[in-house]
Image (spheres, rainbow, N blue to C red):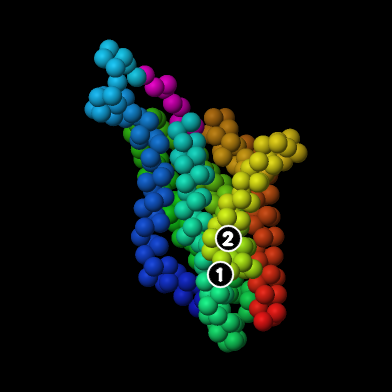
Amino acid sequence: MQWNTLFQKEVVENWRNKKWIWFPLVIILLSILDPVTNYFLPQILDAVGEMPEGMKFILPEYTVPEVVMMTLGQLSSLGVLVIVFMAMGIIANEHKSGVSQIILVKPIDHHSYVTAKWASLLLLVWVSWILGMLVSWYYIYLLYGALSFSHLVQTIFFYGLWLSLVVTVVIFYNTFVKTQGLIAFLSIASLMMLSGLTTIFQSALKWSPVHLSAYIKLTIEQGSIHTDLIYTGMTTIIIIAILLLLSVILFRKQQLEK
């Protein structure tokens, strides 16, 4: 009951802050930007008139898995940045202003406080991601070819785990850092470090969350779910659980020290 009240409060707060309007629109735009732009790029260049006379711009014929990777690529860069900047003050602002101390004076535990904010962000991110992928699926079908419904669901679920990890990383830093800019920096730096380590130690970190996109592509190309995708998804869920547990512990420690 306590947790439900906090969760509903966060969902309503996100609506009042217009996050339920602008964030889904941004994710939808990023999801279709590359597939649509690449398909119509020759016509765009012709319309602009910057091409030398007699020169033709011929694009390679993209396969459906490659087009899906375009969508995931945009979300892995700009999409991650949008999530980080949207969530960088969700706990830190209340922590810094003292609002969190007032809330926790009531019979509300630290676990409910942190996880309710985390879950409200996950709901927003997942709904936006599903909408974005559905719109992208429609344009992929129109412009490039069919992506099966099963592959659509697998893409939504497994890449959603990566977005969930991004949310959890931001929540983690929110629990013990009060400066929004520093939270954003640490979150982005951590994700970049994970990506860099995965690139360097590919064989040792074959189930790193960074590989989710690559295994999604292999799954679509092969027609059946890739075994490494399942293990990578499980690894991602474990990391999310550990970070969330640490977030609650660190937040409780911060509050008790006051």
Q: Residue at x 63, y 79 (%)?
A: 109
Q: Is residue 16 above or below residue 101?
A: above
Instruction: Give the x, y percent position of residue 162.
Output: 57, 49
- Secondary structure, mark 1, is helix
Query: Which of the 4 quarters of the picture holds residue 58?
Result: top left
Residue 48, visible in the rendered structure: yes
Residue type at mark 2? Leu
Q: Which residue is mark 1?
A: 92
Nearer-N-terminus badge (2/1): 1
Which quadrant of the figure contains the C terminus? bottom right
Q: Position of residue 4 (x, y in %)?
A: 52, 75
At horizontal 67% and vertical 60% (from top left) the residue drawn is 243
Residue 155, position as x, y percentages in the image = 52, 43
228 vs 23, left or right, is: right
Q: Are marks 2 and 1 in contact (CB under 8 Å)?
A: no
Task: For the N terminus, give its image quadrant.
Answer: bottom right
Q: Is residue 85 left or right of residue 39?
A: right
Viewer-nearest residue: 240 or 229: 240
Q: Residue at x 47, y 60 (%)?
A: 86
Question: How many residues crowd around disc 2 within 10 Å: few (fewer than 14), some, or many (20 or more)?
Answer: some
* Residue 229 appears in the rendering: no
Q: Name the dominant secondary structure of the magenta segment.
A: loop
Inspect the image, locate mark 1, and give the three-letter code of the amino acid beneath it: Ala
* Region in magenta: 58-65
- Check the image and report above or below for 236 versus 96: above
**Relative to 38, does residue 60 appear above or below in the rendering?**
above
> Circle 2 sits on which residue?
182
Residue 141 picture quarter: top left
Nearest the viewer among 257 and 80 is 257
Label 1 packing within 10 angstroms: few (<14), some (14-19), many (20+): many
**In the image, residue 101 lies at what x, y percent?**
58, 82
Q: Secondary structure at mark 2?
A: helix
